[in-house]
Amino acid sequence: MLKAIAHFVRNGPEVLRMQKQHSRAEFLDLFNEKADAQGYADVRRELVGDLAGSILEIGCGTGSMFRYYGERARVDAIEPEEDFLERAVAKAQRTSGKIHAMAGDGMNLPFSNGSFDTVVICLVLCSVASTSRVLAEAFRVLRGGGQLRALEHVRSGGAVAGLLMDLGNPLWLRINKQGCNWNRDPLAALSEAGFWVDDVRAFQRFDTMMPAFPMRLVKAHKPR
């Protein structure tokens, strides 16, 4: 925990300067580009690079994930924030029809039951109004046997670190200005939604852009 705090203190000021110098959408694009260059590109590839068939990405932001989908992927990507969506649409238009970005809310997906082979959620569950509602909707639109891929940061499992994250969350919300809560842990909600969890990879990175959150890369599926 002390190492993570020191990492934040050392790198946070530069990220905050970037945030002040750019619009929300510009900042998110620049942030993700720098984070990917420092190693998150490999994490994104692990998350979606092998996927094929019909895919729904919930909360695509500015479309930073699009470049990492494979040639056999056909992606519908939804995003509720207009400024983010504008950039995502522009990126999707450069994919020769492989990706379609549109307005949409993960709390109320505009798709029929069993519409997709895979649902992708990346750094979204920290900021939604209801984690359980989004996961219930993801479960609904997946076909039986379909996959869920998720990359999320989680509350620390340590007693002291977890408590500090709880106490510091209001301040973190004011700092990040993206509605990001750093003390959520969606793994229990996956099972409650009906998913079977196949694999959870825990990791933590100390790059200069991303805070050194405890991270989870999750692969799960909807029972047939």
Image (cartoon, rainbow, N blue to C red):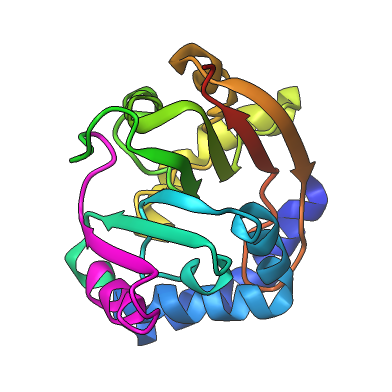
Residue 177 in view, yes or no: yes
Residue 138 in view, yes or no: no
Residue 38 vertical placement versus 134 (above, below): below
Residue beneath the point at 25% across and 68% down: 85
Residue 115 vertical placement versus 122 (above, below): above
The location of residue 174, given as percent across then percent down, is 37, 53
The location of residue 38, given as percent across then percent down, is 72, 76
Image quadrant where one finds the N terminus:
top right
Residue beneath the point at 70% across and 43% down: 214
**Magenta region, residue range:** 85-107
Q: Please check the rendered image and state whether residue 89 is part of the magenta-colored stretch, yes or no.
A: yes
Residue beneath the point at 57% across and 42% down: 149
The residue nearer to you, when weighing 186 against 64, is 64
Task: Answer left or right for 48 relative to 31.
Answer: right
Snapshot quadrant of residue 44: bottom right
Q: How many numbered badges does the structure rendering display?
A: 0
Residue 26 vertical placement versus 130 (above, below): below
Task: Answer left or right for 115 relative to 155.
Answer: left
The location of residue 61, given as percent across then percent down, is 36, 63
Snapshot quadrant of residue 35: bottom right
The residue nearer to you, when weighing 44 against 26, is 44
The location of residue 87, given as percent across then percent down, is 29, 78
Residue beneath the point at 36% across and 84% down: 94
Kindly give the residue lying farthest to the right in the view shown. Answer: 3
Q: Please check the rendered image and state whether residue 73 is part of the magenta-colored stretch, yes or no.
A: no
Residue 49 vertical placement versus 163 (above, below): below
